[in-house]
Each structure stands twice: as C-alpha cells, then as structure tokens.
Image (cartoon, grey):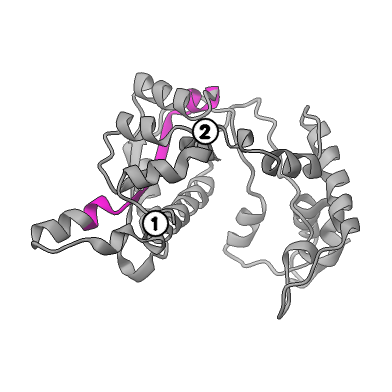
Amino acid sequence: MAQVIDSAAAGHAALLDGRYGDGAADAALHLDQAGTIRRLLEHRSVRAFDSAPLDEAIVDTLVAAAQSASTSSNLQSWSVVVVRDQAHKSAAATLAGDQQFIRDAPVFLIFVADWARGAAIARGRDEASEGIGFLDSTLVATIDAAIAAQNAIVAAEALGLGAVFVGAVRNHPGELSALLDLPDAAFPVVGVALGWPRADDRSQVKPRLPQVVVRHDERYRAGVPQDLEGYDRTLRRFNESQGRAGGWLDAVVARVRSASALHGRERLRAILSSRGLSSS
C-alpha cells in the first residue's frame, strides 16, 4: 500500500491505487485541505453525457478558468470556439473522428492556437508579422491553447461536470477550420466535450504509468522493460473491467508503426503551412 504523508488522510492511499494500480507502491501522497490534488488524481474521461443543457454562467466560468492559465509572455495566443448548436456540433463531430459523444455533449469547446489576432494587431499598426512564421510561435500558441483547455477541464470537474479531451479535431484541421470560420494563422488544437455525466456512466480513473517510468531525477535514464510490462498488465485488467480489450504496449506500437494511425494528421505540416504557420 502506498505511503500517505498527510496524517489526516486515512484511506487516501486508495487515490494512488486508483491512479497507478500496481505502481502505487513507489509513490507517496500529500493532500491539500482544499481538495485540489484529490480532484486532479480522480480525473477520468467521461463520454456518456446527460442531455441537460449547461447554462451560460457555467460556460463563462469555464472560459474564465481557461483564461486564468499561464500564457507565454501574456500574449494569450489562443481562442476557444463554443459549439452548442446541434447541427453545427454534429458537423464538427463528423470531422473529429465521427464520435457520437461529441454530438451528445451539450457543449463542445474547441481550443484554437490563434496568431490571427496578433497578425491583425500588427497590420493595424502597419507592422510586419514575420515572427508568426517560425516554429516556436506555432509551439507557443499550441501550448497556450492546451494549458487553457486543461484549466477548463479542472474547473468543469470541480463543478461536477464530466469532460474528455478530443485530439481528433486535428484529423481534418483544414475542413474544421473552414466550418468554424477560422482565419489564417489559427488552427484547432484540441476539443473538450463536456456535460453532466449520465446516470449509467461507467468511466473510472484509468491507471497511469508508474512514476519510476516517467520521473527522471537529475538526468534521463532508460526505462526498465519489467516496469512497462507490469503497467501493461495493469492496464489490460482495467480495460477488461471497462468492457474493452488490449493493453498499453500494443497501443503504443499501433500508434507509432505507420502514418495510417494518425487518421489524417500526417497532413498537419502542410495544412499549418497553408494557414501561414510554421511546422519546421
């Protein structure tokens, strides 16, 4: 059983057991009184949503939380498109892996790396915007958008909502950009489907790799195959409990083996270039 540093947190080791499974023995835990760490450790991806709508105050709150995230040099080079109209949402879902849970979610947030705003400001002052065309600018806007999206999910879960990231918004970024009327120098980074979890939602906390695999003290060191194999067994058991099959090692190989696993994202370099953003 995992060591628990917080003496008032009897039973909190279950959080680590849920997050790491068999890897929990190598970790320790200190919880804060506000419950922020507990909420982070209990994160799960929800794909079964109730049809109840979200009021405007909730959406405003999530956007405010997203805007409270760190942002490089305070440039705030991101935007978010709030999609609620059912027909519009369905069209976005078709382009984002044709996933039904996007259609079922009352709100679909699409976080956008956005240098269009910076380019417009430069044009308004008769200045060039050469700096947007370099890879670091693409990374800055992408990282800003991703951090903002994570803040929105943490806020959503604090309100009792369920949420899931949707990387498939990059499957057809050109078509999705057209659907959202995104200008040049802007592209969709990640979506967030969210809503109230349905009563029959079965999603659970998914075990992660043990810390010994991802944590490197002072210098990077090669991983131990036994640690990866142990996690593979842990995830296989979890997947079986969720009615799914397969482990982690096979999933990694399937993702890196060929370009076909990118589901259209192998074209991202060319699409970024066509939109005035650098990928090289």
Amino acid carrying mark 2 in the image: Gly
| Mark closest to the chain's N terminus, 1 or 2 | 1
In the image, what residue occupies the spot 21% across and 56% down? 119
Amino acid carrying mark 1 in the image: Thr
In the displayed structure, would residue 120 be above or below residue 220?
above
Badge 1 local density, few (<14 within 10 Å), some, or many (20+)?
many
Q: CA distance from mark 1 to mark 2?
A: 19 Å
The residue segment tinted magenta is: 100-118
In the image, what residue occupies the spot 48% across and 38% down? 267
Nearer to us in this view, 259 or 53: 259
- In the rendered image, residue 124 lying in the magenta stretch gets the answer no
Residue 136, by quadrant, is: bottom left
Q: Which mark is residue 150?
A: none
Q: Position of residue 35 (x, y in %)?
A: 60, 60
Let me know if residue 190 appears in the view.
Answer: no
Q: Position of residue 216 (x, y in %)?
A: 73, 72
- Residue on which the image places disc 2: 264
- In the rendered image, residue 114 lying in the magenta stretch gets the answer yes
Nearer to us in this view, 124 or 156: 124
* Quarter that holds the N terminus: bottom right
- Residue on which the image places disc 1: 138
Badge 2 local density, few (<14 within 10 Å), some, or many (20+)?
some
Nearer to us in this view, 226 or 135: 135
Q: Would residue 274 appear left or right of 47 to someone viewing this image?
A: left
Q: Would residue 14 appear left or right of 275 to someone viewing this image?
A: right
